[in-house]
Image (cartoon, rainbow, N blue to C red):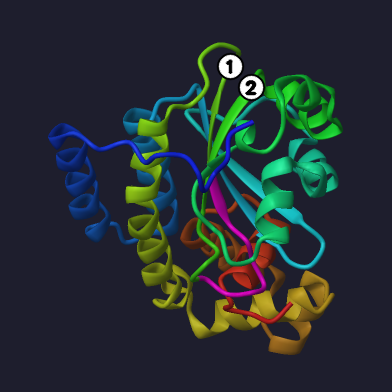
Amino acid sequence: MNDVHATTRAELTRADLRKIMDLAHQLNDVTTVRQLRQTIMEALGRLIGGNLVGLNEIALPGFRSIVRYWPEEPSIDDLNERVSAYLHLHPTACYYFDTAADFLPTMVSDHVTPVRWRESPAYQEIFVPIDAVHQLTIPLFPDVGVQRADAYAINREAGTDFSERDRAVAAALQPLLVSAHRRLAHHGGDGLTERQVDILRRLGTGQTQEAVARSLRVSRTIIKRELAACNVKLGTVNVTSAVAKAAHLGIITP
């Protein structure tokens, strides 16, 4: 295992710094959550290198997770449920939540030997199905609030682990990613209207769509149309994920 604090930081090349600056300018032009997520995951795959990049959006307490992937979603129906169930056994997650003062990018290999990692339930249940062995995590949660713990994770298949140069690139990118997410969060959930926020808030309390339609004195069709708009603006795929994402962003109170 590596000692995270004893590791000598690799120096970035001019080419690395130029690419990081290019990404910073690109993120300034991003206006939607979906575009932000896609832009960052593509950049991480290009700048650091990995066969699968993910954004894990974690609701606290309870580790309820929604994971987005690039370049494509793995064809595993219960992957979010697997992540939610086993994340508390992931060595990197354990490290972050046991060491609240340290949210630097870190690798799985910093915290566990290869043998113990492959024997762990988190590896067997989450990583084997997506054909990943190595992982480098870039947490966002130092600056986005205590009700969520989001992080980008770059995954690689069996073979070469991440290098100190990869860690240095991740560390240089981290404040850019945190700032970009915070900027969009402060813009009210990517342009949600007052009615859309109200609908999500009511659904978050357990009301059904029919009950929300009755209380707002509108048709069920209008509710469906508003929820479809919420999915587009939040980058979600259904009512459950839209409510969860709105709670993650602090737009509604869970």
Q: Main secondary structure of the magenta part?
A: loop
Image position of 242 with respect to 118: above or below: below
Name the residue type under label 1: Glu
Image position of 19 with respect to 234: above or below: above
Are the residues at dot 1 and dot 2 in contact (C-beta closer than 8 Å)?
A: yes
Q: Which residues are magenta?
A: 144-152
Residue pictured at 46% horizontal, 39% vertical: 7
Q: Which image quadrant for residue 176?
A: bottom left
Q: Which residue occupies the foreground of this view, 245 or 148? A: 148
Residue corresponding to mark 1: 157
Residue pictured at 61% horizontal, 36% vertical: 110
Image position of 242 with respect to 43: above or below: below
Callout 2: helix, strand or loop? loop
Is residue 147 rendered magenta in the image?
A: yes
The first of marks 1 and 2 along the sequence is 2
**Can you give x and y, in whole percent of width and height, for residue 66 in the image?**
67, 50
Q: Which residue occupies the foreground of this view, 94 or 206? A: 94
Total count of labels: 2
Residue 106 placement, left or right of 81: left
| Label number found at residue 132 | 2
